Amino acid sequence: MYTLLKEYANILSSDAITFASELVSTPSPSLCEQNAARLVERRMSHLGFDKVITDDFGNVIGIMYGIDSHPTVLLNSHMDTVLPGKGETIWEMPPYSGAIENHRLHGLGSSDCKSGVAMQMYAAYLLKKSLLPLRGTLVVAATVSEENGLSLGVQHLLSKTLPDMKIKVDYAVLGEPTNLGLFYGHDGWAEFRIGLGSTNPDSLQQAAEVIFQNLTDASRERVLEGGLETMRVGRPEIDVLTGSAGINLNRRLFAEDDSEGVAEKLRDYSLRSLEQYADRVGNQEDDLNLDIRIREEIQKLNNGESVQVRFVTDAWETDPFSPLVDRARQALESAGCKSRPGKWRLPQLAMGTAGSILTKRFGIPTIGYGPGNEDQAHAPNEFVEVDNIREGILGTASIVHSLVGTPVFGWTADMEI
């Protein structure tokens, strides 16, 4: 079976890489993914998915039906990217070049996560082209609105689109950057808004500066191994006309953390800072008031719909000894692919994956397997190794078949076609 998959994977990979280049060349910043979605929808139809739709959020879903409706595996990667950045960001090639040089595909989203989109689509096509029967259902979803860290597209996919189609997901594989490692979790994050109020403009500004400085000092003391940030504090925003000030704070969340509990700790820390300020200026009767909450805002999606979003993503982990991880590892090894287990490091705060939504909200066992490198995510001069896309197509197809495929007797890894 694996020889068969390898033969066809070699044939299909060039087309997949070209398609990945086209995706990178198509700008699709978060909340503006329409052009990339049309490209994905056309290609899915061309590849012969049994059903292809674009839902009312802008997610593109391709389905390949098996003999039975269950089990179902979801392959998910996102189409949106961050913005290329300005000023200090220097791109040696244009961000949307999609150029392939020195065995690398260059451009914004090449690693995070458009190569993952192409890899998963062509892995499904590889199974179809190889005529390997599926016992269950394969869903490939290219989703929107992930780069805000909240995975709004995936939330809609699982709460509305797939249930309306009578599809229940049993396993999920994310095409996020893992450098072809087999990943099973990561830390979370939350963005808090520290609000201050006072009728005294001088007191308001000085108190905000004290809290900012104390929190900044604390963030410098809490750097993880490898230089990973645990907290980032924004400069105070002062509005003397309304007598208010605000500080945005991004905090890494660990498995033992609760976002509301972290908010209470930040409240206590800020109150102690205010007490220190009052002692220093000798003013115990100031009218300063304090409010801390998780930041929320209304965002407008690419379909014109507005949604209220809350800036928090929980830490998550799939048991590394679970049947899902074990079966995926065995499939990769049998196909001659790398099978390095690990977890995302998240080198920048506010980065994440849909794994939190999949596991925490919907209870779906989830792993990550993608061609990109997370150190390239959100970085200038982003690239992905072309060979990773090639191997990732074979690896993903092998994982899928191990989960929802029908055993094929008569084939071994060393048989010729």
Image (cartoon, grey):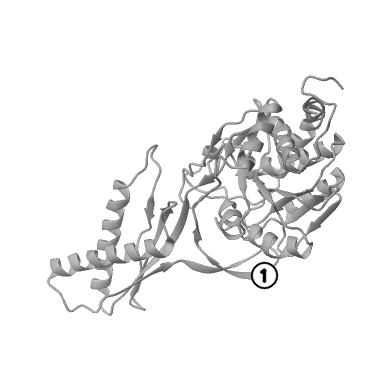
Identify the element where label 1 is drawn. Answer: loop
Report which residue position mark 1 lands on.
Answer: 305
Q: Mark yes or no: residue 305 visible.
A: yes
Query: Would you place residue 323 above or below residue 389 in this image?
Result: below
| Amino acid on which disc 1 is placed | Glu
Position of 260 with respect to 107 (left or right) is left
Q: Mark yes or no: residue 100 visible.
A: no
Spot occupied by residue 68 in the image (x, y as percentages of width and height): 83, 50
Q: Quadrant of residue 17?
A: top right
Q: Quadrant of residue 134?
A: top right
Position of 264 with respect to 49 (left or right) is left
Q: Residue at x 71, y 30 (%)?
A: 390
Q: Nearer the viewer, residue 54 or 9?
A: 9
Q: Nearer the viewer, residue 67 or 291?
A: 67
Query: Would you place residue 306 above or below residue 365 in this image?
Result: below
Q: Nearer the viewer, residue 257 or 349?
A: 257
